[in-house]
Amino acid sequence: MRITYSETVVMYNLNKIHGERTIYSLYHLFQGKRSSQTIQDAHLYQLTPFFHSYPSMTRSWLENTVEALIKKGLVEEIAETKVILSANGKEVLENQLAHEPLPLFLNGWKYHQVTDVFWERLTLLIQVCSNLVHREKSFIPVRNKKDTLTWVKQFISQQKEDRYQLAERLYRELVLSLDNPNTRPELIVVRFTGFGKIGLTPVQAAELAGVESVHYYFEFLNALHALFDRILEEPSCYPLLTGLIKHADQEVPLTISTEKTYRFLQKGYLIEEIAAARKLKESTIEDHIVEIILTIKDFSIDPYVAREKQQRILQAARKISARQLKQIKERVQDASYFEIRLVLGKFGDVEWN
């Protein structure tokens, strides 16, 4: 049985959460919801590549896709809004992935905050350079955001070179950075607008490539994220493109409320003291600490969980191959749910047995 690309993506993610979360956890994941729960789930189930990877997804689209998979016998409902893959579903997914693997370079967690900004700047810069080379000063900008227009204008003025040199340098950097046998750079190039040429819309690009829109979007992101990887690995080789990626190589910032909690922690405040000072529940502060651990990799959990207990929690989680807190607590009864969340958050990206 063959399944669509969108069904493959949904099934892959459903298989990862294995009925331990509702289908709507995937909706929040694809949307890139900045909540402690979604951030933790993304790391816990090794689904960070898909964070904010499909922000145009709707709840109804996800519901309809899951319903279609149920009717095909590929997934089974085990509770309200919770499903797992059937034996046949696992076999179909495995065959589909062998035939058509999911994007290799997709990294939504790392790049979700810079992808849109980079794309707007790049497409406008290409259009401006193309028209300048052809001495065309009157054209409708492909981007109309004031911030983007102002930024590109200033960026060009900072380069201190004539239009031909700038265009040539941008062309060389793009050719070199997009040269990757494991991506489809043409899915990016067809979207560029230049002198006498209007770039395709995502729908038109998908039609040209002969793939469904969801498939196109993921391949498009894959090519962009691969380009980001290459640029950040050798920024000196891509000075122009590096300039378009602002802070992409830095850690994803904390949410505003969590950032405030983090400042208190840095000053040595205890959880109960922060809760009192901020007039928040202690459980909310605990959520913030989990987010901090997931975002700031060198943040230690030792002050909150003894190392010996960390090991017991990890052993229990790996033994049952589950991330359900209740099941782990049954095996490590002296651990609190907060301690379990911290350990899973700290080591959740490690492959499980």
Image: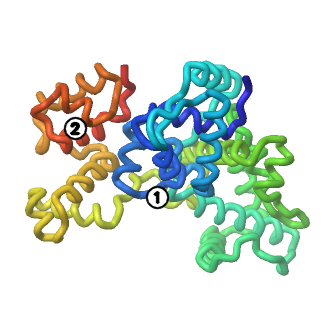
| Pair 1/2: label in front | 2
Q: Which residue lies furthest to the right in this view?
A: 196
- Res. 239 in view: no
According to the image, label 2 marks what residue? 340
For residue 85, above or below residue 26 = above
Q: In the picture provided, is 103 more to the left or to the right than 341?
A: right
Viewer-nearest residue: 153 or 118:
118
Please, what is the three-letter code of the amino acid marked with disc 1? Answer: His
For residue 203, above or below residue 311 = below
Q: SS of the residue at dot 2?
A: helix
Q: Where is residue 65 in the image (x, y as percent from the top left)?
A: 64, 42
Q: Position of residue 154 (x, y in %)?
A: 61, 75
Q: SS of the residue at dot 1?
A: loop
Viewer-nearest residue: 248 or 42:
42
For residue 137, above or below residue 233 = below
For residue 88, which quarter of the picture? top right
- Res. 323 in view: yes
Q: In the picture provided, is 102 more to the left or to the right than 114?
A: right
Q: Earlier in the sequence, mark 1 or mark 2?
A: 1
Viewer-nearest residue: 179 or 252:
252
Mark 2 surroundings: few (<14), some (14-19) or many (≥20) residues within 10 A: many
Q: Which residue is drawn at 54% across and 28% down?
A: 85
Q: Position of residue 164 (x, y in %)?
A: 79, 64
According to the image, label 1 marks what residue? 247
Viewer-nearest residue: 178 or 8:
8
Q: Distance between the residues labelled 1 and 2?
A: 32 Å
